[in-house]
Image (cartoon, rainbow, N blue to C red):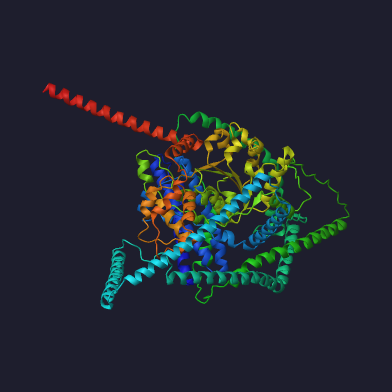
């Protein structure tokens, strides 16, 4: 796409945003709603439309090369991401479920489920690429040093006599087997040579008959090849088989990728030029316009001195720097108004306490009244005020004021506009000069007052300085590592194995399909299992977006802890590594098996927690991972695991959660494949959000097999029946599929693919060695999730719905009976 196309897309996206903001205002001003279906439709329509705008804005931010436009898009992106999270929170509160199905709304808007995919903003990693590379180099250096130390420490293990004899026997038997195999191969080769020699001597075919045999075989082979080719062409024409180049990118796609990379390079060049222009234009303004600005400010302030002296008979008090200095004077006000305001400020301070006490009393009264009226009045639903509407409105207004009607035909390369920089920098230069002028004029005002006092012959009484009220000192936690640098703490955590290197995995590598029957199943009062792509969206919403953007994390509904529960092999660890890769976050491993024997005792535990969360805050974003999180909340620790001390963090876990504030981009993620072993209440208190990851369904298995086989070097042909393979492997997880693909697709097998194509049967034998996830285990996860707080609310809501439907049916039945009785009585009278 060209600059003109992206600018057109930008204009259209802002038009959609303007329309949405108007709709938000109308919904907030509308009457409260009571119908849950209508409420859910309102929320889902807003959610879907914001996701569409978010997708457009993210692609614009990645490809637009104008540096000043990028800043507006970034500002709007923060607002849109935060608003999406707020709407998601409202939808969860309404439906008491983390997973939502809105097929009917998608049909009305003529969209497909793929349009609801939350994109990962590429600038999360791109904007801090240098920092991430530096961290990666430090981590690699320390890990390599540790590996060398481990190799030096490891000593030669002494073997007993029996072990040594056993090893010698094994090697001797292997040597004898190899010799025997070699000898048998030679015998077989000799037998084959003798057989061929006898066959050649016995065959006395005439040249003509031999030629006919060769022609027959060749013609059959060539005809079969032609018919096979025609058959594939026919199937491709009927769109029953994908063409061979279907998976390969086309020339247009390759060209688009090349242009996108070139635009990223141009974007970086323009950004460097813009940063240089900021400095040069500011220095130019200070040199050229600085003296004039200083003179005008001095004249204005002196004129103010004279006017105040003439009207009040004395010189005014100069405002402090905290109150804005001379900027507070020239706000289109007279000197008398300024003096009145300065005097009124002192009175306001006194009345603040009285107002606070009155408001507190009113709030208490309102609470009491609210409790009394809750039983009598039933309030409807109304849209909760958003923290991000102002952010989006600011971005929209700046677009309309600056860019909407600006003619950029001459700015074809889309470089920065110097006029806009001058407007911003002129204000900065004026503020800097104003600070200097204020210092000069304060001294001048003091000298004027002293001169007037000398003329009058009066001594100025020195007033007592008002002592500032001592506020209550907030208790701060003791810093156990005051004299240590962040680099030393970072290095210590790496050496202890607590700070680990995340695998380079993208969230898009977590493959699956959507649940296309979610709405229909819920209409029949059946709760469907979530699909893998629904889980991927939750990770993007609850993990990646808040960790990637500081503005979003501060204002959006905060998620401090997240639990991923599901059978082993469904990709829980992969999601954690993807979470770190997409946001550039540090990964701390506080799993019970990893912390065993490290930092022993109470003081050691306190030091470990302090180190982890200090480094996590200073080098945010950070992810703290607790694998086998159920062990931390065991009902009873097994004898085999008492040495690990799995419940070390249990008591301090609530304090850790309280210490995480809105400005700390730190997320605690737990993973578990046996959540039913933990104490339910404390487990659910520790983790704010619980995401249940199911085993893959048929459509997800079909997509997974296709991608896993291709990743491992396999070639898909018509002989590979993926549909049957996906049907047969019901109950197996992604981990099982990967193991089977690696077992089958060895280097030797990959060389044979052109002559011997893959079949589905080859993957059955390695899969049969593993135990699948049976329905009983899946039902166990379902029943456990139903006992969680959100699951209980969901069950309660469904019961209330069933009771209402039952009562309505009874009323209809009673009405029908009464009507029948009335009809019977009428007939008898006749």
Is residue 229 placed above or below 766 in the rendered structure? below
Instruction: Name the one closer to the observer, 57 or 281.
Output: 57
Q: Quadrant of the C terminus?
A: top left
Q: Is 724 displayed left or right of 140 in the figure?
A: left
Is residue 255 placed above or below 72 in the rendered structure? below
- Where residue 33 sits in the image (x, y, percent)? 41, 41
What residue is at 72 percent from the left and 73 percent from the top? 287
Q: Is 96 displayed left or right of 321 in the figure?
A: left
Instruction: Name the one closer to the observer, 650 or 37.
Output: 650
Residue 14 appears anywhere in the view: no
Residue 107 appears anywhere in the view: yes
Q: Quadrant of residue 548?
A: bottom right
Instruction: Name the one closer to the observer, 199 or 28.
Output: 199
What residue is at 73 percent from the left and 57 percent from the top? 308
Is residue 473 placed above or below 537 in the rendered structure? above
Q: Residue furthest left?
A: 830
- Where residue 90 sits in the image (x, y, percent)? 48, 44
Q: Quadrant of residue 415?
A: bottom right
- Where residue 241 sits in the image (x, y, percent)? 33, 62
Instruction: Give the total number of marks visible in the rendering.
Output: 0
Is residue 569 placed above or below 300 in the rendered structure? above
- Where residue 54 sits in the image (x, y, percent)? 48, 57
């Amino acid at each position: 796409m060209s600059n003109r196309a992206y600018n057109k897309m930008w204009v259209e996206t802002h038009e959609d945003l303007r329309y949405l903001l108007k709709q938000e205002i109308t919904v907030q001003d509308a009457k409260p709603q009571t119908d849950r279906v209508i409420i859910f439709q309102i929320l889902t329509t807003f959610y879907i439309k914001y996701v569409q705008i978010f997708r457009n804005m993210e692609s614009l931010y990645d490809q637009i090369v104008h540096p000043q436009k990028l800043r507006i898009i970034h500002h709007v992106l923060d607002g849109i991401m935060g608003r999406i999270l707020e709407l998601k929170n409202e939808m969860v509160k309404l439906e008491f479920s983390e997973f939502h199905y809105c097929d009917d709304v998608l049909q009305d808007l003529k969209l497909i489920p793929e349009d609801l995919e939350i994109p990962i903003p590429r600038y999360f990693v791109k904007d801090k690429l240098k920092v991430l590379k530096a961290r990666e180099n430090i981590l690699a250096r320390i890990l390599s040093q540790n590996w060398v130390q481990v190799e030096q420490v490891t000593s030669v293990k002494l073997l007993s006599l029996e072990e040594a004899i056993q090893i010698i026997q094994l090697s001797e038997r292997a040597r004898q087997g190899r010799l025997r195999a070699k000898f048998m191969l030679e015998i077989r080769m000799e037998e084959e040579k003798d057989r061929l020699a006898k066959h050649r001597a016995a065959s006395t075919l005439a040249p003509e008959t031999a030629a006919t045999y060769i022609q027959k075989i060749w013609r059959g082979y060539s005809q079969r090849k032609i018919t096979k080719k025609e058959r594939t062409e026919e199937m491709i024409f009927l769109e029953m088989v994908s063409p061979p180049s279907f998976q390969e990118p086309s020339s247009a796609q390759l060209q688009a990728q090349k242009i996108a990379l070139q635009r990223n390079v141009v974007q970086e060049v323009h950004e460097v030029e813009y940063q240089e222009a900021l400095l040069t234009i500011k220095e130019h303004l200070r040199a050229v316009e600085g003296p004039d600005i200083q003179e005008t400010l001095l004249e204005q302030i002196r004129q103010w001195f004279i006017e105040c002296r003439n009207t009040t008979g004395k010189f005014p008090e100069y405002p402090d720097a905290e109150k804005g200095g001379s900027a507070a004077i020239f706000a289109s006000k007279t000197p008398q108004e300024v003096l009145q305001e300065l005097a009124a400020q002192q009175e306001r301070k006194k009345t603040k306490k009285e107002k606070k006490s009155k408001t507190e009393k009113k709030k208490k009264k309102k609470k009491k009244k609210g409790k009394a009226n809750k039983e009598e009045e039933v309030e409807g639903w109304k849209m909760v005020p958003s923290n991000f509407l102002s952010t989006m409105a600011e971005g929209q207004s700046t677009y309309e004021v600056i860019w909407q009607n600006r003619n950029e035909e001459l700015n074809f390369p889309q470089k920065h506009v110097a006029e806009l920089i001058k407007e911003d920098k002129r204000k900065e230069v004026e503020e800097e000069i104003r600070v200097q002028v204020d210092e000069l004029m304060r001294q001048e005002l003091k000298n004027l007052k002293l001169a007037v006092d000398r003329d009058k012959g009066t001594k100025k009484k020195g007033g007592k300085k008002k002592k500032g009220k001592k506020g209550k000192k907030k208790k701060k936690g003791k810093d156990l590592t005051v004299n240590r640098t962040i680099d030393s703490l970072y290095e210590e955590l790496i050496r202890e194995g607590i700070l680990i290197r995340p695998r380079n995995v993208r969230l898009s590598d977590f493959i699956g399909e959507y649940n296309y029957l979610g709405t229909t199943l819920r209409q029949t009062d059946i709760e469907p299992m979530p699909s893998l792509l629904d889980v991927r969206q939750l990770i993007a919403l609850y993990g990646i977006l808040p960790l990637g953007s500081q503005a979003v994390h501060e204002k959006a509904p905060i998620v401090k802890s997240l639990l991923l529960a599901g059978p082993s092999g469904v990709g829980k660890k992969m999601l954690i590594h993807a979470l770190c890769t997409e946001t550039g976050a540090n990964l701390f491993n506080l799993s019970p098996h990893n912390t065993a024997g490290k930092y022993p005792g109470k003081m050691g535990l306190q030091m470990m927690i302090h180190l982890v969360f200090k480094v996590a805050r200073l080098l945010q974003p950070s992810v703290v991972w607790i694998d086998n999180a159920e062990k931390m909340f065991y009902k009873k620790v097994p004898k085999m695991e008492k040495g690990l001390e799995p419940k070390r963090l249990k008591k301090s876990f609530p304090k850790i959660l309280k210490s995480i504030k809105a400005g700390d981009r730190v997320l605690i993620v737990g993973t578990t494949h046996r959540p039913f072993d933990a104490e339910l209440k404390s487990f659910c208190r520790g983790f704010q959000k619980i995401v249940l990851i199911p085993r893959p369904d048929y459509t997800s298995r079909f997509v997974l097999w296709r991608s896993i086989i291709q990743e491992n070097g396999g070639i898909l042909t018509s002989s590979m029946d993926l549909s049957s393979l996906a049907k047969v492997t019901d109950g197996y997880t992604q981990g099982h599929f990967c193991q089977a693909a690696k077992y089958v697709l060895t280097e030797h097998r990959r060389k044979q693919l052109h002559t011997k194509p893959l079949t589905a049967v080859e993957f059955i034998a390695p899969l049969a060695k593993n135990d699948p996830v049976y329905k009983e285990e899946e039902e166990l996860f379902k029943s456990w999730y139903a006992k969680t707080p959100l699951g209980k609310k969901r069950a309660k809501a469904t019961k209330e719905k069933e009771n209402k439907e039952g009562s309505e049916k009874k009323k209809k039945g009673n009405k029908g009976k009464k009507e029948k009785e009335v009809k019977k009585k009428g007939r008898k009278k006749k």
